[in-house]
Amino acid sequence: MSVSVPIVILSGGLTPIIQALLTTLIGHELLGIEIIANSVVVRNNFRSVNDEGGAWRVQFHDDSVFGNDKASTIRQYAKHIEGMPEHEKPILLYAGDGVSDISAAKEADLLFAKHGEEGNDDMSNA
């Protein structure tokens, strides 16, 4: 029996950096892995990466505080699977370790979070 597990990476990071890192770690093209993160836009008329303002700018995924409202994305997936039979419905698993993950953690079925040093844990209230 073959089972497919959809993997979606929600990040406040930059898509090309995440793609490069995962490709290096996995060792091949990221087939079937969806990345929802911030983009990079190359500045018009730049001559050198040393130019004032740099060669590119961040294109945020949305207008939220962290540039990517991860909770909103999880809610969209939850709504999409809402009508599926229970035995076919995937578990919405979320792993995060920072402030930008708190609202998303509250939307997931299952949460994995890192425990911070000396009890400092951004996810403790999720």
Image: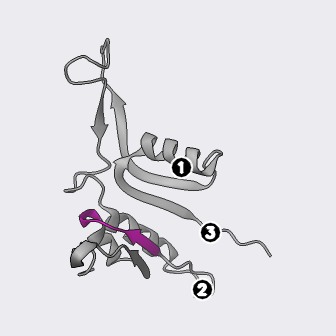
Disc 1 to disc 2: CB gap under 8 Å: no
Label whose residue precedes the other's in the sequence (3 or 2): 3
The residue depicted at 77 percent of the width and 71 percent of the height is: 2
Q: Which residue lies furthest to the right in this view?
A: 1
Is residue 121 shown to the viewer in this render?
Answer: no
Residue where numbered disc 2 is placed: 85
Q: Name the amino acid, label 1.
A: Leu
**Residue 85 relative to residue 51: left or right:** right
Is residue 124 shown to the viewer in this render?
Answer: yes
Identify whether 65 is placed above or below 38.
below
Please state the extent of the stretch shown in magenta in the rendering.
93-100
In percent of width and height, residue 122 lies at 24, 72
Q: Residue furthest top?
A: 47
**Residue 81 relative to residue 105: left or right:** right
Label whose residue precedes the other's in the sequence (1 or 2): 1
Q: Residue furthest bottom?
A: 86
Numbered tag placed on residue 22 in the rendering: 1
**In the image, residue 98 lies in the stretch drawn in magenta:** yes
Foreground disc of the pair 1, 2? 1
Foreground disc of the pair 3, 2? 3
Displayed quadrant of residue 126? bottom left
Which is nearer the eye, 116 or 18?
Answer: 116
**In the image, residue 71 lies in the stretch drawn in magenta:** no
The residue depicted at 47 percent of the width and 75 percent of the height is: 93
Residue where numbered disc 3 is placed: 5
Q: Name the amino acid, label 2.
A: Pro
